[in-house]
C-alpha cells in the first residue's frame, strides 16, 4: 500500500531522530501542524514542500511518493556513475566525489540499502583516521555523523545480515575513533561469539548431506580463504598495537609468522598471491618500519627488498590463468590472485614513505629506488 505524505513525513522524521517539536522549529511552524500532517488530518502548504524536503535531504518527489525506495535499475545506474568518478590509484578527492554522487541518489531513494551501503563504505574510508591517504580531514567529522544515520537505516531496513553486521562494524570503528566508546561497545555486542559462521561454511553442511562432496570441499576452501584474509588483517592490527606499546620484537614476530604461514600454504607454487598487500598496509613495508624502530636497518632493508622484488618480479608473473596448487585453496578461482597495487598504494609510494626517511642515504635503499624508478 502506497504511503501518504503524512506517513512519509513521520517515517523520515523518526529516521532522523527528530521530535515533532524539533521538525516544527526547523520549518517555522507549530508542532500541532506537524502532528496534523503525520496523522493525515492536514496537508503542508505547497510553499512548505521544498523546505520539508531540504530538512530531510531528499527530493520533493519522495514526499509526493513519486519515487519508491527500491527501483533497482535506477539505483545501480547511480552507483555506476558514482564509481566512474573514482581514480586509480584511489585518492580522497575522487572518493569524496563518489560519496557526494551517492548522497544525491539518496535524495531520491532515501532508504535504499544499496546506496546506503555505498555511502557507508565510502564514508568510512574518508572519515576513519587510519585510512592513510584516503582520510579526508576537512570533511571527516561531518561524514562520520552522516554515517551514523546511514548505518542506523541499514540496520533497520536491510534484510541482508551481512549488510547489517557490516553497518555495526563500521559503527564500532567510527564511534571508537571519535571517542564515543559507549556507542562503539553497543555495536560490538551485536556480533556473534563464533567467527566461522559464514555462508560458505553453511553451504558446506548443505553439500555434505546432499553427498555433493566436490561442492562441499569447494565451499570449505572459500571459507578458508575468508579466515586467511581475516587472520592477516588481525595480524597487522596486532602488530600495530605492539608498535604503539613499543613491543617491537613481538610486532616483528607477529608479521614474520604471518608471512611464514603464507609461504607454507603456497609452498608448491611459483608465486604466492598478493595477499600480503592489505587495504591499509603492505606487510613487508610495515615489517620494515618495525625493524627500523627496533634499530635494525639491515633487516628493514631486507624487507623492503622483498617488497620490491615481489612487486616488480613475482607480481608480473600473475595472469588470468594463475591458480594455486595448494589443496587448501586450489578450487578458488583467479580472485585469490587479483591484483591490488593499483587499488591501494603503488610501489613508489610505499618505498618513499616518510617512515623510511632515515634510509635515504643508504646505498642499498638508493639501489632499490633506482630499480623502482626505471
Image (cartoon, helix red, strand yellow):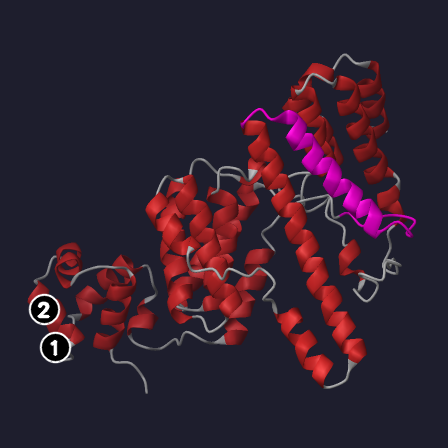
Report which residue position mark 1 lands on: 42
The quadrant in which the C terminus is found is: top right
- Residue 320, compared with residue 317, is above or below; it is below
- Left or right, 231 with respect to 323, comes to left
**Of 363 and 327, the residue lying toward us:** 327
Which element carries disc 2, helix, strand or loop? helix
The answer to the question of whether label 1 and label 2 lie on touching residues, with beta carbons closer than 8 A, is yes
Identified at 67% across, 27% down, the residue is: 249
Q: Residue 295 location, x and y as percent?
A: 69, 16
Q: What residue is shown with label 2?
A: 33
Per the picture, the main secondary structure of the magenta-coloured stretch is helix
Specify whether residue 124 is painted magenta. Answer: no
Residue 62 percent across, percent down from the top left: 33, 71
Residue 249 or 266: which is nearer the viewer?
A: 249
- Residue neighbourhood size for the residue with mark 1, other residues' Cα within 10 Å, grouped as few (<14), some (14–19), many (≥20): few
Q: Quadrant of residue 237?
A: top right
Q: Is residue 370 visible?
A: yes
Q: Which residue is drawn at 54% across and 47% down?
A: 95
Q: Distance between the residues labelled 1 and 2?
A: 8 Å
Amino acid at each position: 500500500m502506497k504511503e501518504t505524505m503524512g506517513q512519509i513525513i513521520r517515517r523520515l522524521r523518526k529516521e532522523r531522530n527528530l521530535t515533532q517539536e524539533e521538525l516544527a522549529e526547523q520549518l517555522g511552524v507549530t508542532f500541532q501542524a506537524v502532528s496534523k500532517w503525520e496523522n493525515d488530518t492536514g496537508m503542508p502548504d505547497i510553499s512548505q514542500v521544498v523546505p520539508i524536503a531540504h530538512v530531510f535531504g531528499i527530493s520533493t518527489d519522495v514526499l509526493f511518493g513519486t519515487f519508491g525506495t527500491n527501483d533497482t535499475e535506477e539505483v545501480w545506474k547511480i552507483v555506476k556513475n558514482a564509481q566512474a568518478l573514482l581514480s586509480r590509484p584511489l585518492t580522497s578527492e575522487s572518493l569524496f566525489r563518489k560519496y557526494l554522487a551517492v548522497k544525491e541518489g539518496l535524495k531520491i531513494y532515501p532508504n535504499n540499502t544499496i546506496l546506503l551501503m555505498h555511502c557507508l563504505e565510502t564514508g568510512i574510508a574518508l572519515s576513519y583516521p587510519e585510512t592513510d591517504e584516503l582520510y579526508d580531514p576537512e570533511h571527516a567529522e561531518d561524514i562520520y555523523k552522516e554515517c551514523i544515520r546511514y548505518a542506523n537505516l541499514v540496520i533497520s531496513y536491510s534484510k541482508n545480515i551481512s549488510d547489517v553486521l557490516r553497518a555495526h562494524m563500521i559503527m564500532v570503528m567510527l564511534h571508537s575513533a571519535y571517542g564515543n566508546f559507549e556507542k562503539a561497545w553497543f555495536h560490538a555486542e551485536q556480533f556473534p561469539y563464533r567467527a566461522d559462521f559464514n555462508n560458505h561454511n553453511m553451504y558446506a553442511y548443505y553439500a555434505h548431506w546432499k553427498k555433493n562432496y566436490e561442492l562441499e570441499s569447494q565451499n570449505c576452501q572459500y571459507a578458508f580463504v575468508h579466515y586467511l584474509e581475516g587472520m592477516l588483517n588481525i595480524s597487522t592490527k596486532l602488530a600495530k598495537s605492539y608498535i604503539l606499546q613499543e613491543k617491537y620484537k613481538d610486532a616483528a614476530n607477529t608479521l614474520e609468522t604471518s608471512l611464514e604461514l603464507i609461504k607454507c600454504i603456497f609452498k608448491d607454487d611459483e608465486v604466492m598471491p598478493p595477499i600480503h598487500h592489505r587495504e591499509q598496509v603492505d606487510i613487508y613495508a610495515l615489517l620494515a618500519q618495525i625493524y627500523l624502530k627496533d634499530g635494525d636497518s639491515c633487516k628493514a632493508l631486507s624487507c623492503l627488498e622483498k617488497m620490491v622484488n615481489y612487486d616488480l618480479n613475482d607480481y608480473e608473473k600473475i595472469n588470468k590463468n594463475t591458480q594455486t596448487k595448494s589443496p587448501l585453496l586450489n578450487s578458488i578461482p583467479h580472485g585469490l590472485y587479483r591484483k591490488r597495487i593499483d587499488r591501494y598504494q603503488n610501489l613508489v609510494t610505499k618505498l618513499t614513505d616518510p617512515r623510511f626517511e632515515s634510509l635515504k642515504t643508504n646505498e642499498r635503499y638508493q639501489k632499490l629506488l633506482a630499480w623502482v624508478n626505471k
